Image (spheres, helix red, strand yellow):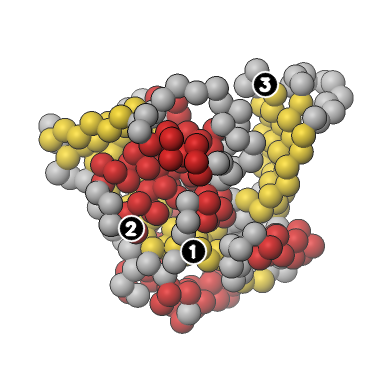
Amino acid sequence: MILCVTPNPAVDRTARVDRVTLGAVLRPTEVIVLPGGKGINVARAAKTLGALVTTTGFAGGHAGRWLVEALDADGLNPRFVPMPGETRTTYVTLDAGGRSVLVYEPGAAVSEAEVEALLALLVTGLLASATWAAICGSPPVGMRPDGYRALVEASHAAGRPCLVDVGGPALEAALAAGPDLVKVSRDEAGSALRTRSVDAASAARSLVARGAALAVVTDGPRGAAAADGRATWDVEVPAIRAVDAIGSGDAFAAGLLVALDSGRSTDEALAFGAAAGTANAETLGAGRFDPARQAELVDQVRVRRRARP
């Protein structure tokens, strides 16, 4: 079972329109409403790939109740800590030409007691039945970056490997605890490494030097790079016609976890994850794709392993 921790979940509303035009009334041709946030997207994609999953984090208000009910209906086994504030909503509007407008509400504040309650839930119950923990997404107001270090430490104390996908100070804090796998975008890596000019391979090596056992840095249609201190991998993805790339990094993370959890090699896991991320970009809604299409794309991903320079 893959345990997906999303401290700052959201109700994701995605609308497709004929053309994004600022200042105009936009009438969607299609709308999808999903429970969202990085960890929830990972869980949805992992379940699509055949994994058992459990989701957790903070949820509150009418939106939080809807989110938990929807996760339960989708078989994503929600075990959320209640909070007094309202779970946030994110709004995405996009068109066929690739233009988009993204509006992300800030998450409601959580207290120290609620953060401790989440840690206790992990330690006393959820981690015991997990094979991997995935700690994903931004912290809500009130959760300090050190909370991510505590989540990694709790996973390791329970003898469970963990993946971290977050940027900025939270990633810096998590790296201090030595996560087993870091999967971030190139921009997220740059925010933690305090540089905007780093390439994916260099970023992956730097993340390993700072504490990650294995680091994977995605770079959109340019693919991804990975490093583990002994080798570097370059991942080339096939060219596709993207519909909605939001959540592709989360689908990539899900594929990595499912493959590694089944005992596949790093090379195989990178191809499996990249195929999931690519399939996600062909489908509206984060973490949603056709598993048959993902299986087809695995053979089109090119993974090249080279000794570390």
Q: Give me the residue at 46% from left, 39% from top.
A: 294
Q: Which mark is first along the chain, 3 or 2?
A: 3
The kind of residue tagged 2 is Ser
Which numbered circle lies on residue 96? 3
Answer with the quarter of the image where residue 129 lies.
bottom left
219 lies left or right of 265: right
The span from disc 1 to disc 3 (Cα, nearest Å) is 34 Å
**Quadrant placement of the C terminus:** top left
Q: Compared to 236, does 72 lie above or below?
A: below
Residue 49 location (% of width, % of height): 47, 51
Q: Name the residue under label 1.
A: 52
The kind of residue tagged 3 is Ala
76 lies left or right of 306: right
Between 14 and 242, the residue placed more toward the observer is 242
The kind of residue tagged 1 is Leu
Residue 229 location (% of width, % of height): 17, 45
Residue 101 location (% of width, % of height): 69, 29
